[in-house]
Amino acid sequence: MPNRKDDMYGDHISHQFNDDLSSLKNDFLKMGGLVEQQTIDAVNALIDGDGQAADEIRARDKVVDKMEMDLDEEAIRLIARRQPAARDLRFVISVIKMVADLERVGDEAKKIAKFGLTLAEEGQAPRGYVEVRHIANHVTSMLHDALDAFSRLDAEQALRVMKEDKRVDEEYQAAARTLLTFMMEDSRSISRCMAVMWVLRALERVGDHACNIAENVIYMVEGEDVRHTPVEEAEKLVGR
Amino acid sequence: MNSINSTIPGDATMPEKAPLAVEDPVTEERRETVEIEEGKTVGIPFSDNPKFALRNVEVSYGDTRAIRNISLDIARNEVIAFIGPSGCGKSTFLRCLNRMNDSIDTCRVKGSLMLDGDDIYDPRRDVVELRARVGMVFQKPNPFPKSIYENVAYGPRIHGLANRKSDLDEIVESSLRKAGLWDEVKDRLDATATGMSGGQQQRLCIARAIAVSPEVILMDEPCSALDPIATAKVEELIAEMSESYTIVIVTHSMQQAARVSHRTAYFHLGHLVEVNETNKVFTAPEHELTESYITGRFG
């Protein structure tokens, strides 16, 4: 598999083509950065009980949605005008798919902000926030690493992100068990604990989307489709 | 069709010049960074059911080696596309398949070239019979300056495929039908062929090639002089013909190679760099040079 990382976007005879590909890449990373920040901010707003920040996050989701549509249009225009092939084609197709994942991450951030608002209004002693913070750190760093792998065309790193997903699932299970214990101890906490449970669920989904992005990065770089493939097998495909 | 110089118009008449004559600076630079191992082709160059079995083929014009140790099978009823930058040897290689290179004095062909297990370059082989089995369609339509009917009837007549007029009529009609031209010309078979549109002329040339019941049809950039609609018709025809014929097509349009072929072969400076399923070549080619070429990074 050709893997010349220096000229993924450049080096075409047509400079315009180079520019189109680079700007698609940069716009995608911009959207990735925003979505990552949205998730971090949403979790902070939740933990700090900051209702105003939560409102801002919900408003900013409109920007994310707009970016999704703009990126899709950019990608479609590129296909129509350039008929990209091989790695260029894989790049454009991967971007279209990963944009959908990013938009969903944005929605999860919005959801977290919404629960943040509800919980802030109730204003009782937080429960399960340790778990929230822990998983939030984990999945946002996965998202960051996946975007970084995209930026550096690093299939190995994408593979590491895929591996992390299993750990997030375990952490999510453990956190859910802890919250269940709280609910059994004190039935008045059930609605609050359920809200936190939904937040955990949203974070776990962020991890899944990071994982999807990582899979697309591997397809883009290596030309191997590793979706629905056990990580061990994906590892062999990447190592080839 | 026997005399290359009079029938192949334009640059198709030129023997592939020394590959090193390509002076694109990007290519020049690339040549230093990417090494091609002679005789080594990545992908799937061989077949279980070959129509052509070509081994260690070398072609040179005088001192210039145009084809360097290429081995390839072309499968029965396969459509295989040859792609590559100008001067890469793809047309030269194509023309070895029915000895169209014979008329170029300085051209030497070495290696083993078998058609159904028989040596194409056996000195005792009847070249006219070979070219009836392995027909050819050229870059620019080149109908004879005769009637539409005569264009198609000429081959079967000289090859003695039809004794009676009614047999000949039948061959003409069925060939024109296969070429998707019958409905357009059935009322004016006596009209001169050169009055047809370019797309019609090219399909007439395909009908003419089909008329002698060939097994293989070689196409050297058959659509480069045609508009998109005529091109689509010819491509449609290629898809239909692949049921009964083996088709080898040289094309500069990568989209065309992607559309019509089962396998794609990438030539570079006289080397056969990669042969793979067309789907693979256009989504995830194995060789770096193939990738650079089809993504428009040089060529």
Image: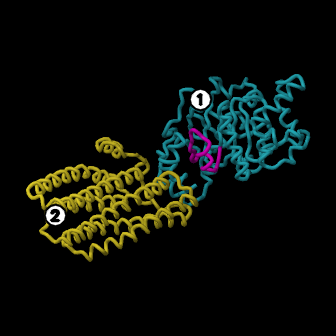
The subunit carrying tag 1 is B
Q: Give the class, few, some or many, for how many residues have Cα within 10 Å of label 1's Cα (few <14, many ≥20).
A: many
Residue B100: quarter of image: top right
Camera-nearest residue between B53 and B212: B212
Q: Colour of chain A?
A: yellow
The verdict on a common chain for dots 2 and 1 is no
The picture places residue B129, in percent across and down from the top left corner, at 76, 27
Specify whether residue B65 is in view.
no
> Which chain is mark 2 on?
A
Task: Label 1: state its secondary structure.
Answer: strand
Name the outermost residue toward the left: A185
Count of numbered labels shown in the rendering: 2
Instruction: Kindly identify the amino acid type of the residue bearing the numbered disc 1.
Output: Ala
Q: Residue at the location (9% across, 58% down)?
A: A186
| Residue beneath disc 2 | A129
Residue under circle 1? B53
In the image, which lettered chain appears cyan?
B
Pair 2/1: label in front: 2
Horizontal and vertical percent for residue A220? 42, 53
Q: Residue at x 52, y 40 (%)?
A: B276
Residue B138 appears in the rendering: yes
Badge 2 density bin: few <14, some 14–19, many ≥20, Cα 10 Å: some
Report the amino acid beneath label 2.
Answer: Tyr
Residue located at (13% from left, 56% from top): A183
Residue A10 relative to residue B258: left or right? left
